[in-house]
Amino acid sequence: MTDPHPDGQAALAVFDIDGVLADVRHRLHYLQSRPQRWDAFFLAAEQDPLLEEGARRLRTAQERHDVVYLTGRPERNRGLTRAWLAHHGLPTGPLHMRPDDDRRPARWVKRNTLRRLARNSTIASVLDDDPAVVAVLTADGWPVELATWLPHSSTLQSAQEQQGRT
C-alpha cells in the first residue's frame, strides 16, 4: 500500500546512490590522484559493493512508496548505473541523473530536481549521504535524512560540491 498524492499517485521515497546504496571507497583513489581520473572513477562503479543498510531501507520504503533515485552521477553513466542496480536486485528506475555538462554543486542539482518531482508527486522521504545536500533540502522543508552508515569522504564531498562531478 502506498501513500497517495492528492491526485492519487503514490508518494515518492527518494534515494541517492553513492554512499547510500553503493560503497564507493574502493574507487576514491581515482579522485585523489593528479590529474583526477574521472572516467576510471565512474567505470569502477560497476564493482561497488552494496551497502546493506541502504538496500534494507529501500526495500522497506517500497512497501509504502514509489522509489526513485536522485544521484549526482552524470547522465553518461546511466547504463552502468542501471546494470549495477539490477545486479544487486534493486529497481532500476526511475533514475534522475546530473546532465553531463552540469557542474553545479550537488546540493543545487538535487534541489532543482526534487522541486521538479514535487510538482507531480508528494515527497515522502529523501535519503542522501552528503551533508551539504541534506542541509539545503532540510532548509527547504523536505523530509530528508542523512545516511551515516558510510563515513562521508572529503574527496567525494569535493567532487560533489566544488567540482560538480557526482
Image: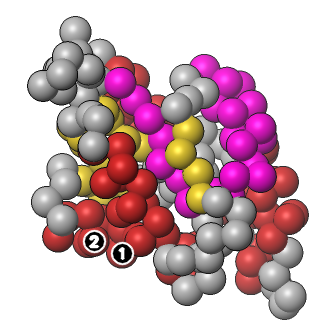
Instruction: Give the magenta range.
Output: 66-90
Residue 13 picture location, percent across and down: 32, 35
Which residue in the protein does label 1 denote? Answer: 132
Q: Residue at x 62, y 70 (%)?
A: 102
Residue 148: within the magenta? no
The answer to which of 64 and 108 lies nearer the viewer is 108
- 165 to the left or right of 35: left
Number of the label disc, if any, that sits on residue 136: 2
Q: Amino acid at mark 2?
A: Val
The answer to which of 89 and 163 lies nearer the viewer is 163
Q: Tell me if mark 2 has few (under 14), some (14-19) or many (20+) residues whose alpha carbon lies within 10 angstroms of its own.
A: some
The answer to which of 120 and 111 lies nearer the viewer is 120
Q: Amino acid at mark 1?
A: Ala
Label 2–label 1 contact, CB within 8 A: yes
- 90 to the left or right of 2: right
Classify mark 1: helix, strand or loop: helix
Query: Marks 2 and 1, how far apart in space?
Result: 6 Å
Classify mark 2: helix, strand or loop: helix
- The nearer-to-camera label among 2 and 1 is 2
- 31 to the left or right of 154: right
